[in-house]
Amino acid sequence: MSSLSASTSSRPDLDWSQLKETIIMLNLAVTQIDQSMNEGNSSVSTLSTSFTGLATNLSDIQSSIEQLSQKNESSEKMKLIIQGSTSTALDKVNSAIIAFQFYDKLNQRLDHVSGSLSSLTALISNPEKLYSPLAWQGLQETIRSKYTMEEERRMFDKVISGVPIEEALIEFNLEMANKSDSEEDEIELF
């Protein structure tokens, strides 16, 4: 059957089903997530490389300034001005690098979502697995295993057990806020 004559929600026939529509929508979601990640990765990679290079250059400038001889008072004033400017710029660059690391974390999460949606699509596309509680349990275990934070696993467990999504998200956000208040974020600079 060609795609032009395939049964769709706008042109249903005897072959139309909600399951096929669900698969189409899941594939669309995966495609949109993947495309967004690809576009974002390209821009962020360029920016990250630029900021890392800029941070190195600013560090080199600071080192060079420290090696300047202190011949007269005006060179000392110039040295202090340049040191202050490079120090401020270096702080801003380091803040930008941290922001890029948060973006990378977001990108990893979206990649996990995309993979989970693809796995879900594969499961519901397979008539032998569609009605198998073991297949669904395996999918849930696979998805849960990709979470890196304990708070994410607890949120997953709550949603799977029937807690409303809004309630699970509120609890997750509270846990994350408490965690950030009690711990120092572990951000690694390049």
Image (cartoon, rainbow, N blue to C red):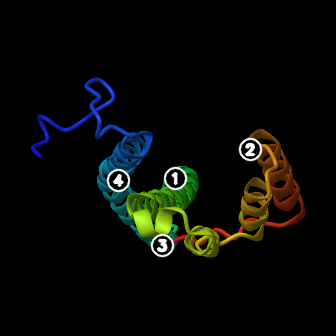
Cα separation, mark 3 vs mark 2, equals: 53 Å
Question: Of the residues under marks 3 and 1, which one precedes in the sequence?
Answer: 3
Q: Residue at x 57, y 59 (%)?
A: 98
Cα separation, mark 3 vs mark 1, equals: 22 Å
Q: Residue at x 49, y 62 (%)?
A: 130
Q: Amino acid at mark 4?
A: Asp
Q: Amino acid at mark 1?
A: Ala
Give the SS element for disc 3: helix
Give the SS element for disc 4: helix
19 or 175: nearer the viewer? 19
Q: Nearer the viewer, mark 3 or mark 1?
A: 1
Is residue 79 visible to the viewer in this orientation of the structure?
Answer: no
Q: Are marks 3 and 4 in contact (CB under 8 Å)?
A: no
Cα separation, mark 3 vs mark 4, equals: 43 Å
Query: Which residue was labeled with disc 2?
Result: 165
Q: Are marks 4 and 2 in contact (CB under 8 Å)?
A: no
Disc 3 packing (10 Å; few <14; some 14–19; many ≥20) = few
Q: Amino acid at mark 3?
A: Ser
Q: Are marks 3 and 2 in contact (CB under 8 Å)?
A: no
Residue 79 location (% of width, % of height):
51, 57
Q: Amino acid at mark 2?
A: Ile
**In the rendered image of this protein, does residue 66 appear above or below residue 95?**
below
Q: Nearer the viewer, mark 4 or mark 2?
A: 2
Query: Which residue was labeled with disc 4?
Result: 34
